[in-house]
Amino acid sequence: MSDHHDQAVVRRARPEDIPALVASSAALFAEDAGTRDATVDINWPLAQGAERFASGIDDPARLSLVAERDEEVIGHLVGTVADGSAMRPVKLATLHSLYVRPAHRGTLTGARLVAAFLDWAREQGAQLAEVTAYAANADAIRFYERNGFGPHTLTLGRSL
């Protein structure tokens, strides 16, 4: 783990960051879903991530951030905002993807990515922010709780 003064720059992703976003997303899929969810195609970021990231860079309802240190991307965050519905009339911000390389964890880089996402969500008029984590990923759950998220819903699943 790096020391706590490891200050990465958190900024909006640019088109030239797409290969690094794909690599960061692939690392997340391998580490998280790859060890917890056999139903997820962990090769998805490599197969379709570039197109997905490219389409989101200029989309005002999507936010793609990178954390960069010494001109190297060490993490990313992807989030969206969506208008409410008749049933749930609240503008919602969803944090879809967050990853920080293991060597840079414990440096507040993840917390700074989340803070930037929450600031953006407020600017977009969101009234609620949410994130999902695998129930077996205790570290992620603790991280999100430290950053102000709390239990809201529970999804249960079973094999058929």
Image (cartoon, rainbow, N blue to C red):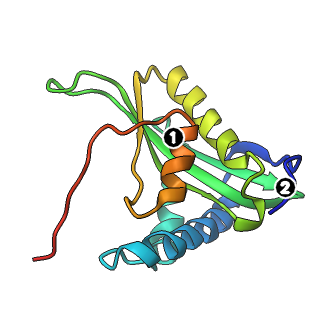
Residue underneath mark 1: 145
Residue at 46% over, 62% down:
137
In the picture, the disc for residue 69 is 2
Pick the quarter of the image with the C terminus.
bottom left
Q: Which of 68 and 31 is in front in this view?
A: 31
SS category of the residue bearing label 1: helix
Q: Is residue 56 visible?
A: no
Q: How crowded is mark 2: few (under 14 residues within 10 Å), some or many (20 or more)?
A: some
Side of 48 relative to 146 (left or right): left
Residue at 51% over, 40% down:
145
Real-space Cα separation, disc 1 to disc 2, in angstroms: 26 Å
Given the image, on which type of amino acid does mark 2 rest?
Answer: Arg
Res 123 quadrant in image:
top right
N-terminal-most mark, 1 or 2: 2
Q: Is residue 52 visible?
A: yes
Q: In this view, does 24 lie above or below 118?
A: below
Pick the quarter of the image with the N terminus.
bottom right
